[in-house]
Image (cartoon, rainbow, N blue to C red):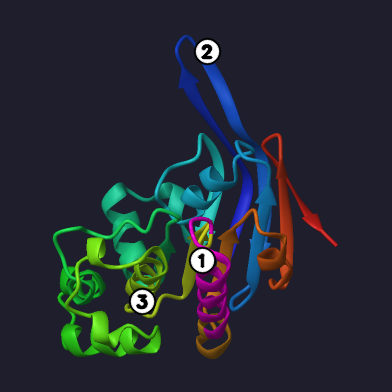
């Protein structure tokens, strides 16, 4: 499902080059749940963005579903994300001018899929927010906004879900609810789940755990 071969990422900071990732290699099979842990600034979110095709590595190769993401144009990567990838951000990334329903419908409408409204309502019901479908993000709590973001990520039935600190801005109760939803969807739909987290409990729920340290990745056993 996901194969990473000797990936590095270097960015320019003023007159200096900063190496964020150093020779990362890993392989994730379809349907697995994987946690990436590590200190702030260790490169976890950078790696997740590369895996999802949101950015390009400085060197190395990334394959999703057998396709070389690093050889694709931005339009081709966007098409792959629309077809096979869901992404949940710590900061929710909901559009403030759209209702919860419209936010969830958006990926389907962008791909001209039929039945977008019905499908979005079904997902909102699954995350317990059908009664809040007409509310705007500012009218929702943090936990509700994250559930809308999760529904939006799953509305296209992605093969892979990437989650960047999905419970990081939530209290214990709402964080627990999001955990249940993530793993229920992973287990019921066979969706490959890759998440970055600072939460030891959340990492322990995953089948596999990797630690990022100083730009290098090692699997924990």
Residue indicated by mark 1: 66
User: Is the residue 202 above or below the residue 54 in the image?
Assistant: below
**Residue plotted at (47% across, 9% down):** 15
Q: State the image coordinates of residue 103 (x, y, percent, origin top left).
A: 22, 69
Residue at the limit of the structure toward the right, as seen here: 221
Front residue (pair 33, 80): 33
Let me know if residue 46 appears in the view: yes
Residue count near mark 1 (Cα–Cα under 10 Å), binned few <14, some 14–19, many ≥20: few
**Residue plotted at (28% across, 60% down):** 94
Query: Which residues lie in the magenta part?
Result: 168-184
Sooner in the amino-acid sequence: mark 2 or mark 3: 2
Residue indicated by mark 3: 151
Quarter of the picture containing the N terminus is bottom right
Membership of 175 in magenta stretch: yes
Element type at marker 3?
A: helix
Sooner in the amino-acid sequence: mark 3 or mark 1: 1
Which label is found at residue 16?
2
Q: How far apart are marks 2 and 3 (CA)?
A: 41 Å
**Residue plotted at (33% across, 85% down):** 123
Of discs 2 and 1, which sits in the foreground?
A: 2
Q: State the image coordinates of residue 88 (x, y, percent, origin top left).
A: 43, 62
């Amino acid at each position: 499902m996901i194969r990473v071969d000797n990936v590095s990422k270097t960015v320019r900071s003023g007159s200096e080059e900063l190496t964020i990732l150093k020779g990362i290699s890993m392989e994730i099979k379809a349907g697995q749940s994987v946690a990436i842990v590590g200190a702030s600034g260790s490169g976890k979110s950078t790696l997740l963005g590369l895996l999802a095709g949101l950015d390009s590595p400085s060197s190395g190769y990334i394959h999703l579903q057998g396709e070389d993401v690093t050889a694709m144009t931005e339009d081709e990567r966007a098409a792959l994300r629309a077809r096979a990838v869901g992404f949940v951000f710590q900061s929710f990334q909901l559009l403030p001018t759209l209702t919860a329903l419209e936010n969830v419908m958006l990926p389907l409408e962008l791909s001209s899929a039929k039945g977008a409204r019905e499908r979005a309502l079904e997902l909102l019901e699954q995350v317990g927010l059908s009664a809040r479908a007409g509310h705007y993000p500012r009218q929702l709590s943090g936990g509700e906004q994250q559930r809308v973001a999760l529904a939006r990520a799953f509305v296209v039935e992605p093969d892979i879900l990437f989650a960047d600190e999905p419970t990081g801005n939530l209290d214990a109760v709402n964080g627990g609810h999001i955990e249940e939803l993530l793993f229920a969807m992973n287990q019921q739909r066979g969706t490959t789940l890759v998440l970055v987290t600072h939460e030891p409990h959340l990492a322990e729920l995953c089948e596999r755990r990797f630690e990022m340290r100083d730009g290098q990745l090692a699997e924990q056993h």
